[in-house]
Amino acid sequence: MVRVALSLVVFSLLLSACSAPTDRDNLAALHRQERTTAAQADALTSEQSLALAANDFSSKARLQALAQQQNLVVLSTYTPYQGSQARIYGSTALGCIDGAVAVTESDDLKFQHWGKGRNFAHPIMAQYLQDLKQRLKAQGLPPLVVGDIGLQYGGPYGPKSNHASHNTGLDVDLPFFFAPEHKEVASHPDVYIVRGQKVLPTFTVDIAQLIVSASSDPRVDRVFVAPMIKMQMCQLYEHAPANGFLHKLRPWFGHQAHMHVRLKCPSDSPNCVSQAPIPAGTGCGYEVESWFLPPPPQSKTAQPAPKPKKVLPQQCKLLWARKRK
Ligand SMILES: [Zn+2]
């Protein structure tokens, strides 16, 4: 119902754009629609309410309950998210964010510099990173290293980038090395921990712990790692307690020198489009092993299904037009 309502919102905005009102008119309409959508969200069916509750991070107790439900280690250090001015429009693959905050370096968080102005995050991501760096510290691990997060107003990085997402301040790349105390790592070379099906000596116990810590968080939707990393993590933790993080670890191409953490849509961004849920289970066994099997022979007559056309939300066009002025 919400998706239908959102389509109607976007459709009506597109219609109103045809009669060329000013950006200010459009934004006023947008905010009215946002309030309407939020009101509609209050009237959800019980099934949808449950789905929404999965991104209610408004109290420490709530985060702890979710961690328990997801079979994750329950922490005493979560920072609750009690709402912000930031709003996300669209998906992490094609969307934008108004109100992103800059994540800055500190003694316990360093950037491996991949490009200019890529340190903007939704406030919930900034809180997640703060919590993660504290968690690493509590485990006696060296400072956290962060790669790309997002641009100030979101959106794609441009044709020269190989990021297919990072559009909404909910994605972060975490390289597989730590920062030595009081040293800059801006131009540190990438550290591969696997190459194809080979596990390298750089895949240390501390790096495994970094992957566990980053993915053991109820705010995390999924974490992309190379298939061999998922395989190795399954071997290490499949029979361990609190191994619900394995469900969130998703094998994907690349990701041999960093993991890509994606957070869930915050509940106060009704226009944030979530990715389809991950299938139930750890994803160990056949699911990860299938990445190493030869591809099935292709039928000569089979035509690949056309990919659905990606549409940039109208709100993003308006936002970027307003910010460029
Ligand atoms: Zn990434």
Image (cartoon, rainbow, N blue to C red):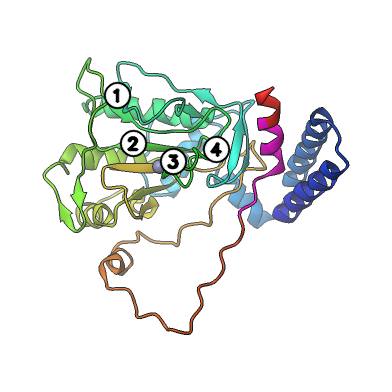
Secondary structure under tag 3 reads loop
Q: CA distance from mark 2 to mark 1?
A: 13 Å
Q: Which residue is located at x 30 percent, y 28 percent?
A: 144
Q: Position of residue 72 (x, y in %)?
A: 37, 45
Of 90 and 307, which appears nearest the observer?
A: 307
Q: Does the magenta-highlighted stretch encompass residue 238?
A: no
- Callout 2: CB less than 8 Å from ligand 1: no
* Residue underneath mark 1: 186
Q: Which residue type does callout 4 highlight?
A: Thr
Q: Does residue 103 show up?
A: yes
Q: In the image, which residues are magenta?
A: 310-320
Of 208 and 7, which appears nearest the observer?
A: 7
Say few, some or many: other residues with alpha carbon within 10 Å of mark 2 (under 14 / 14 to 19 / 20 or more).
many
Badge nearest the viewer, 4 or 1: 1
Q: Tell me which label, 2 or 1, sits earlier in the chain.
A: 2
Q: Tell me which label, 3 or 2, sits earlier in the chain.
A: 3
* Residue underneath mark 3: 160
* Residue underneath mark 2: 174
Q: Are marks 3 and 4 in contact (CB under 8 Å)?
A: no
Q: Are marks 4 and 1 in contact (CB under 8 Å)?
A: no
Which image quadrant for residue 257?
top left
Q: State the quadrant of the C terminus.
A: top right
Say few, some or many: other residues with alpha carbon within 10 Å of mark 4 (under 14 / 14 to 19 / 20 or more).
many
Q: Which residue type does callout 1 highlight?
A: Ala
Q: Which residue is located at x 64 percent, y 38 percent?
A: 269
* Residue underneath mark 4: 168
Badge nearest the viewer, 3 or 4: 3
Q: State the quadrant of the N terminus.
A: bottom right
Say few, some or many: other residues with alpha carbon within 10 Å of mark 3 (under 14 / 14 to 19 / 20 or more).
few
